[in-house]
Amino acid sequence: MARAVRERASCNLVHLAIGIKVDLFIKGVAAFDMAEFERKVLVRLGDETPHDVFVKSAEDTLLRKLLWYRLGGEVSDRQWEDVRGILSVQAERLDMVYLREWADRLAIRNLLDRLVSRG
């Protein structure tokens, strides 16, 4: 975790007993990193002993995964299936103006358009 913070990378936490993995991402300094952080969403996890945690918005998760898809040569079925899943589950709730604005700024608008038109 210290290396992830130092290198502004990511790391994982794994609960071996129940098999849950959590990805942790260190906030970067680029404009999109700041926007992601500003739009974080508070979510309550658990019933018996609930914990409040911040997570990325659906829009920011979708954009970040499209960025990873682009950086990976647009061959990762996993990333593409993830964004299709976000679109499928969140369709009517997604802020399309925000998505298009950032897709333009991140030079991934063609990927967003393809996703929205074909899923």
Image (cartoon, rainbow, N blue to C red):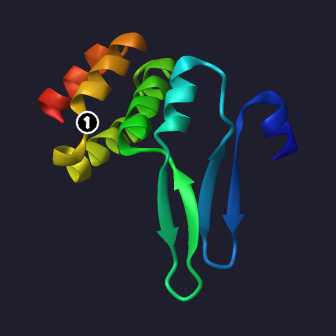
Q: Where does label 1 land, which residue?
A: 95
Horizontal and vertical percent position of residue 21: 61, 61
At x 21% / y 23%, what residue is drawn? 114
- Toward which corner of the image does residue 53 lie, by quadrant? bottom right
Residue 83 percent coordinates (x, y): 33, 39
Instruction: Determine the secondary structure under disc 1.
Output: loop
Seen from the viewer's position, the closer of residues 77 and 22 is: 22
Is any part of residue 15 visible from this angle? yes
Q: Residues within 10 Å of mark 1 (few under 14, many from 20)?
A: few
Q: Is residue 119 left or right of residue 108?
A: left
Tell me which amino acid carries mark 1.
Asp
Q: Position of residue 75 (x, y in %)?
A: 41, 26
Q: Tell me what residue is drawn at x 37 percent, y 44 percent.
A: 58
Identified at 51% across, 51% down, the residue is: 55
Task: Where is residue 7? Give x, y as percent.
Answer: 80, 29
Q: Is residue 41 above or below residue 83?
A: below
**Front-lying residue, 75 or 111:** 111
Name the residue located 61 percent from the left edge and 50 percent from the top edge. 23
Q: Residue 80 occupies which quadrant of the picture?
A: top left
Name the residue at the front extreme.
38
Height in image: 36 above or below 58? above
> Does residue 107 show up?
no
Residue sticking out furthest to the bottom: 48
> How many numbered marks are there?
1
Q: Nearer the viewer, residue 103 or 117?
A: 103
Q: Quadrant of residue 3?
A: top right
* Quadrant in the picture for the C terminus: top left
Instruction: Judge by depth and name the residue closer to the eye, 24 or 85.
Output: 24
> In the image, is residue 51 above or below residue 111?
below
Left or right of 89: which side holds 40? right
